[in-house]
Image: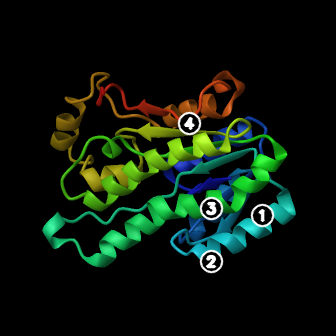
Amino acid sequence: MVTGGTRGIGAAFSRRLIALGHQVIALYRGDAKAAAEAERAGGGQLVALRVDLSRPAEIRAAGTRILHRYGPPAVLVNNAGINRDRPFVEMAEQDWEEVLATNLSGPFHLTRALAPAMVKARRGTIVNIAATTAIRPRRSGANYCAAKAGLLQLTKCLALELAPHVRVNALLPGFTDTREVVERYGLDDPQRLQEVLATIPQGRTGTPEDIADALEYLVSDHSRYVTGQQLVVDGGHFMG
């Protein structure tokens, strides 16, 4: 299962999991066209399901339906997220609450709905998609940074409580070449792009496939002794 699994990095995650032999349930909130395109591209191995991850009751209902039809997931990727960037003194209560509800509470409620069945099945791996801004702040992102920082700590707590049969790790992408990142950071401006690239030792932004490579490692037996960790994939932009 991949939340936000029909666009951007999430779509790359879905494609990679299909290539690894999984059937994918891709949750999405609003872009029905992208969801339909993802289903067509999935060749029968992807089912798109509309769920608003800011609504706990909707998440619980979806979790019940999914478990009844498909059983516990072998892989859960909590990828969906939203941004409502504002300077802190201008940030409305709604800006704060919507970002925390989707980016932090959403993974909590979905994992809570599915984890008991995964533990009972004595198998499974969960990957929470955080961000380097979880460990390094940025302007106009107090809500997003706080939510992603909370997701890192949630990852560690879940790794403790769901062990030994369910592993939980966090994946932290840096600047990645998706439409959302390009628009948010103005990377379609050549000067702005060069300014960003100057801060990345590898001299380029990541591709969705770069991030999917890291996901493949975290869900494979190659990481069977890895849990409660955070993997930063950003070309060396942040070195903590």
Foreground of the two, 63 or 23: 63
Per the image, the residue denoted by label 4 is 212
Which tag, 2 or 3, sits closer to the chain's start?
2
Which tag, 4 or 1, sits closer to the chain's start?
1
Residue 12 versus residue 183 in the image, above or below: above
Which tag, 1 or 2, sits closer to the chain's start?
2
Residue 168 versus residue 52 in the image, above or below: above
Question: Marks 2 and 4: in contact by CB < 8 Å?
Answer: no
The amino acid marked with disc number 4 is: Ala
- Residue 208, horizontal then vertical, whole percent: 49, 39
Question: Marks 3 and 1: in contact by CB < 8 Å?
Answer: no
Which tag, 4 or 2, sits closer to the chain's start?
2
Is residue 23 visible to us here?
no
The amino acid marked with disc number 1 is: Ile
Return the mark for residue 57.
2
Q: What element carries label 3?
A: helix
Q: Nearer the viewer, mark 1 or mark 2?
A: 2
Where, by quadrant of the figure, is residue 36 drawn?
bottom right
Query: Which residue: 31% across, 53% down?
Result: 145
| Quadrant of the frame with the C terminus | top left
The amino acid marked with disc number 3 is: Leu
- Residue 116, horizontal then vertical, whole percent: 74, 55
Q: Nearer the viewer, mark 3 or mark 4?
A: 3
Q: Nearer the viewer, mark 4 or mark 1?
A: 1
Which tag, 1 or 3, sits closer to the chain's start?
1
Is residue 195 visible to us here?
yes
User: What separation in Å lies between label 4 and label 1 (alpha carbons)?
Assistant: 24 Å
